[in-house]
Image (cartoon, rainbow, N blue to C red):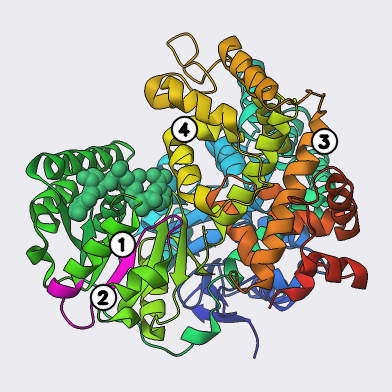
């Protein structure tokens, strides 16, 4: 079947791309478009052409099955230049999405008409590259430097309506895109409007201050990444060179990024996020219907979870302990919704409708009798959770899904508090729950498969990335987090400053260092966790006594304006504190430890080795389905740098033998903590990678 068809509607040629599911720009599509343009040029009856996508979108982008293979002719930049050089007008008719190469094809056309809701974007930076088919040279000509740089360095798409405002779409289609595009083409013919190649427009003049400002901003926000700064370089080339020369610069930059670790990390992340939804046990299993949800507890997590739910169209009943707490929860949700309105994500009327019709905040469980799914987010305490699940068992209708948002507790034990453990599952959201993408779906021993399927359907409805996890202390993410937290705490006990640890890991690419995270989460959380685990502690475990000392000082982190860092008006992001350093020194003295120096390199190596070692255990025990699921958890829930692909991709690229050698070296002084995971040893011995286990 040919993937591009050529037909006529009167004197307008209609070129249709039909390559399901996303009309990707594979070789056959590129050749088909090339041939269709040749046909159009030779067709004297055709005075204009439209390029349109069959199915639900225009052109989704490059063909991912061609990634990593040598490019095959016709190359995309040549095809787009060919379209642009047509002596008769070409109109791109855009619905659904036009992303990456898809939007570049549209920019090669002379005119663009789009549906209001179409999504148009150049997301190449999220895959570690830049637009490589003229996008960096055409977009600034249409929308100006600032808007073009914003689009290309964020990778975020805009709607058809926004694209019209910005100036890279010429007209909006009302209902029937094909009919409207034909009418638009007919009008162009009637007006005698000829071809209008974007590259004939002048490139905006260099604005030195603006470009310097962007460089400074990107150096900070896109820390460590090559692609966003390369976008800027390509745009600057546009201000200095002819289109031909500047697009050669763009191509050179693009090609130089194809074969880099950052590109490989970003691509791994992309494929890992697609693989994560593959859960064999729920294949073909219908999820239960979810329209009405309940949330128990309206604190930090409960209010965020309820916000995510109402924003996705669910009716939510939130149960609190008393009227005051219920009112506070409602206020928090209202504030979250107000900020969604402010950011243009939610219409005011929709917000009002949610608050009056879709959200009830109540005291007492009976209001949950018609809920299809309930998420418990009360205190992290087994007795409290057991009582809540007994209540839920009493009031919930048959078939209702009962979920817990516990961070660490045993979901099997929680399920046993009910007479229907098959309906119980863990839904571990991340804070703030209406923002963070990750949702760990913790499948307990008795969880019914259609309950698991329902959890994945819910994740999708909430716009979250659901990752299947098995039951263990901390599931995938918090279990590995606890382990590498121990490694960093050991370094501090042995002489590293928490500030040096944070700096090393932020320089590595983490969004925040571990002690900044402690301050954000609250030092009481870590303290409580240590208390809970204390009875099971191994005699050789070394506790971070300095963290307990800070807790006893009442320095709980950002909420008390003092934790590892001091927070005040002069330093809202925190500044170091000599008193903290002194407390840590005292703690070391008390334990009879002689401090030594740690280089930034040793700090990152120890942290990564600890993370990889525990992740190997998590995979080996089947807590995570596959190594790439661990990567998704850390990328979407723990601020792991995306361009490094996640901890296990990082391990593969570093070399498992290198990581294992580090672990064995660290074990010389602490064999208890640093015992190598058997899976890591097996893979390293066989010369295999974690990726070899992905399926
Ligand atoms: P929180 O202390 O902010 O909120 C707990 C809320 O539950 C309070 O508003 C309290 O009034 C209410 N509550 C307590 N017992 C109740 C009962 N019997 N009936 C109704 N409401 C009751 O706690 P947070 O941080 O929201 O944590 C809740 C759960 O979520 C915990 O299991 C925690 O481990 C988990 N979690 C917390 C994360 C975080 O970053 N804070 C992240 C992911 C999970």
Q: What are the residue bounds of the magenta stretch?
A: 393-409
Residue drawn at x 38%, y 21% as measured from the top left: 560
| Distance of label 2 from label 4 (alpha carbons) | 33 Å
Of labels 4 and 3, earlier in sequence is 4
Q: Nearer the viewer, residue 311 or 230?
A: 311
Which of pointers 3 and 1 indicates the residue nearer the eye?
3
* Coordinates of residue 313 in the picture (x, y in percent): 24, 62
Residue nearest the observer in this picture, 535 or 312:
535
Q: CA distance from mark 4 to mark 3?
A: 25 Å
In this orientation, which residue lies closer to the viewer: 248 or 425?
425
Q: Residues within 10 Å of mark 3 (few under 14, many from 20)?
A: some
Q: Position of residue 230 (x, y in %)?
A: 74, 38
Return the x and y of residue 602 as percentages of the image width and height: 82, 36
Name the residue beneath numbered marker 1.
174
| Quadrant where the image shows the C terminus | bottom right
In three-dimensional space, the C-alpha distance between marks 2 and 1, rounded to whole angstroms, equals 53 Å
Task: Residue 95: say if magenta.
Answer: no
Numbered circle sitting on residue 595: none
- Among the two numbered marks 2 and 1 on one chain, the one whose residue lies closer to the N terminus: 1
Q: To which residue does mark 3 refer?
A: 602
Measured Cα–Cα span from mark 1 to mark 4: 55 Å
Identify the mark nearer the N-term, 3 or 1.
Answer: 1
Q: Within 10 Å of the Cα at label 2, are there few (<14), some (14-19), or many (20+) other Cα atoms?
A: many
Gap between marks 3 and 1 measured at Cα:
60 Å
Answer with mark 2 or mark 4, whichever residue precedes in sequence.
2
> Considering only order in the chain, which callout, 4 or 1, is on the residue closer to the N terminus?
1
Secondary structure category for the residue under label 1 = loop
The answer to whether residue 81 is left or right of residue 460 is right
Residue bearing the label numbered 4: 523
Q: Mark 2 — residue?
A: 418
């Amino acid at each position: 079947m040919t993937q591009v068809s050529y037909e006529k509607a009167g004197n307008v040629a209609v070129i249709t791309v039909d390559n399901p599911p996303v009309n990707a720009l594979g070789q056959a599509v590129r050749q088909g478009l090339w041939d269709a343009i040749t046909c159009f040029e030779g067709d004297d009856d055709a005075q204009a052409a439209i390029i349109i996508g069959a199915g639900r979108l225009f052109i989704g982008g490059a063909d991912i099955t061609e990634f990593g293979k040598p490019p095959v002719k016709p190359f995309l930049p040549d095809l787009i230049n060919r379209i642009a050089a047509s002596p008769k007008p070409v109109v791109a008719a855009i619905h659904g999405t036009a992303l990456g190469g898809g939007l570049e094809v549209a920019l090669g056309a002379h005119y663009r008409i789009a549906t209001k809701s179409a999504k148009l974007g150049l997301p190449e930076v999220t895959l570690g590259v830049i637009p490589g088919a003229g996008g960096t040279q055409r977009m600034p000509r249409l929308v100006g430097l600032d808007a073009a740089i914003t689009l290309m360095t964020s990778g975020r798409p805009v709607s058809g309506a926004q694209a019209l405002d910005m100036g890279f779409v010429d007209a909006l289609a009302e209902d029937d895109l094909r009919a409207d595009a034909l009418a638009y083409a007919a009008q162009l013919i009637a007006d005698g409007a000829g071809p209008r190649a974007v590259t004939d427009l002048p490139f905006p003049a260099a604005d030195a201050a603006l470009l310097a400002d962007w460089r400074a901003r990107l150096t900070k926000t896109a820390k460590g990444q090559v692609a966003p700064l390369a976008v800027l370089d390509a745009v600057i080339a546009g201000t200095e060179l002819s289109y031909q020369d500047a697009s050669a610069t763009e191509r050179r930059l693009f090609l130089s990024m194809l074969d880099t670790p950052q590109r490989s990390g970003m691509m791994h992340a992309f494929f890992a996020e697609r693989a994560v939804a593959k859960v064999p046990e729920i294949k073909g299993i219908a999820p239960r219907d979810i329209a009405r949800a309940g949330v128990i507890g309206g604190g930090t997590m409960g209010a965020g979870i309820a916000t995510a739910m109402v924003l996705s169209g669910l009716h939510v009943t939130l149960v609190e302990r008393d009227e005051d707490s219920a009112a506070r929860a409602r206020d928090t949700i209202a504030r979250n919704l107000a900020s969604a309105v402010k950011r243009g994500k939610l219409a005011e009327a929709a917000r009002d409708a949610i608050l009056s019709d879709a959200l009830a905040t109540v005291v007492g469980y009976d209001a949950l009798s018609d809920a299809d799914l309930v998420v418990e987010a009360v205190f992290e305490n087994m007795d409290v959770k057991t009582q809540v699940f007994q209540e839920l068992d009493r009031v919930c209708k048959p078939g209702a899904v009962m979920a817990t948002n516990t961070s660490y507790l045993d979901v099997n034990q929680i399920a046993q508090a009910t007479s229907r453990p098959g309906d119980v599952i863990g839904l571990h959201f991340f804070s703030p729950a209406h923002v963070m993408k990750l949702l760990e779906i913790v499948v307990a021993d008795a969880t019914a498969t259609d309950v698991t399927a329902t959890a994945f359907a819910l994740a999708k409805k909430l716009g979250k990335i659901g990752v299947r996890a098995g039951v263990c202390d901390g599931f995938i993410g918090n279990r590995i987090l606890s382990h590498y937290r121990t490694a960093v705490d050991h370094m501090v006990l042995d002489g590293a400053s928490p500030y040096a640890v944070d700096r090393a890991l932020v320089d590595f690419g983490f969004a925040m260092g571990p002690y900044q995270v402690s301050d954000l989460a609250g030092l009481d959380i870590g303290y409580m966790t240590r208390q809970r685990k204390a009875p099971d502690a191994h005699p050789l475990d070394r506790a971070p006594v300095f963290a307990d000392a800070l807790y006893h000082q009442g320095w709980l982190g950002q909420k008390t304006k003092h934790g590892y860092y001091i927070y005040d008006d002069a330093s809202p992001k925190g500044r170091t504190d000599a008193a903290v350093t002194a407390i840590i020194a005292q703690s070391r003295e008390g334990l009879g430890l002689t401090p030594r120096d740690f280089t930034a390199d040793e700090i990152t190596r120890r942290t990564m080795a600890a993370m990889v070692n525990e992740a190997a255990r998590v995979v080996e025990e089947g807590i995570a389905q596959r190594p790439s699921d661990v990567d998704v958890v850390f990328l979407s829930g723990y601020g792991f740098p995306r361009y490094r692909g996640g901890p296990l991709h990082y391990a593969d690229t570093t070399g498992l033998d290198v990581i294992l050698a580090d672990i064995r070296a660290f074990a010389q002084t602490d064999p208890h903590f640093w015992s190598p995971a058997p899976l890591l040893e097996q893979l390293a011995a066989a010369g295999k990678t974690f990726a070899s286990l992905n399926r």
